[in-house]
Amino acid sequence: IAGNWKMNLSHLQSIAFVQKLAWSLKDARHDYSVTEVAVFPPFTDLRSVQTLISADKIELGFGAQDLSAHASGAYTGEISAGFLKALDVQYVIIGHSERRQYHHESDELIAEKVAIAVENGLVPVICVGETAEDLELYGPSAVPVRQLHGALALAGDATNIVVAYEPVWAIGSGQAATPEQAEQVAEQLRSVVAGVLGDDAGDATRILYGGSVKSSNIAGFLRQPNVDGALVGGASLDISEFASIA
Ligand code: PEP
């Protein structure tokens, strides 16, 4: 269960938030060995979150929301995979629809980001998903499948990736896909992973559904054989709701 905070919560707010989230999960006797929970704060929070998680031995995972396709150098404003690794960051979201839309990230750039993440021992959480227009023109699977092929183009022999199927029309809209819709696309995405990275990677890869996930609809998604978890946006900012989803 992954919580994408987007551009919310300062580093001071992140400390109180993670502490309260850990307490809520502890109160509910959450078993992290059954359900992994990770938060994805803004870059400026990562050091605070790392310090707290390590000092208090909290079992939460954490990741970044993006990274640079470059290793280092004259790229003003960018954050390298090496910097993230040095902060014990485990995961990095790549190709979120908001980055594709507002920052015009192409499939080629996303492939470079996936490659540099994997080279540096970070687990990429590769986001794919169709817009409402794509859905009408091409059906639900064609665009996510094309995007995943693109994202894996330079992934070589990556063995540890996460794929998030996030229909753009479902993000932040309150209108989630149905569990059956999510399963239909997730099954095809798993075949893409198996085709490109091999059957073992296909079996081992966790496929998340994202788009208006709440505690009231999570169970339907997780009942699907090819949906292994969720990438949660808005509801990840509400501690009791996010803990309930987990
Ligand atoms: C997201 O942006 O990754 C997301 C799934 O958002 P929300 O849960 O708010 O739809």
Image (tube, rainbow, N blue to C red):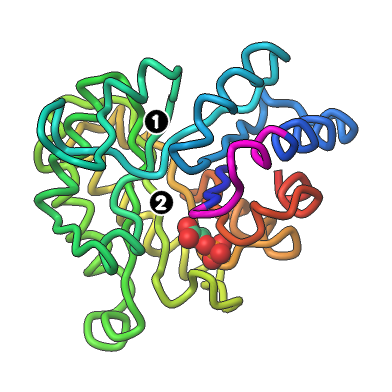
Residue closer to the observer: 141 or 62: 62
Percent x, y for residue 84? 36, 25
Q: Quadrant of residue 129?
A: bottom left
Vertical placement of residue 108 versus 212, above or below: above
Q: Residue at x 51, y 41 (%)?
A: 40
Q: Position of residue 92 (x, y in %)?
A: 38, 36
Q: Is residue 109 one of those drawn in magenta? A: no
Mark 1, residue position: 204
Picture quarter containing residue 15? top right
Which quadrant would the C terminus be assigned to in this image?
top right
Q: Which residue is mark 2?
A: 164
From what the image shows, is residue 218 above or below residue 123? below
Question: Left or right: where does residue 62 sit relative to residue 185?
Answer: right
> What's the amino acid at mark 1?
Ala
Q: Earlier in the sequence, mark 1 or mark 2?
A: 2
Q: Is residue 36 left or right of residue 95?
A: right
Q: Is residue 123 left or right of residue 82?
A: right
| Front residue of 244 and 227 | 244
In this rendering, does residue 179 appear at all? no
Disc 2 C-beta below 8 A from ligand 1? yes
Residues rendered magenta in the picture: 6-15
Q: Residues within 10 Å of mark 2 (few under 14, many from 20)?
A: many
Q: Mark 2 is on which residue type?
A: Ala
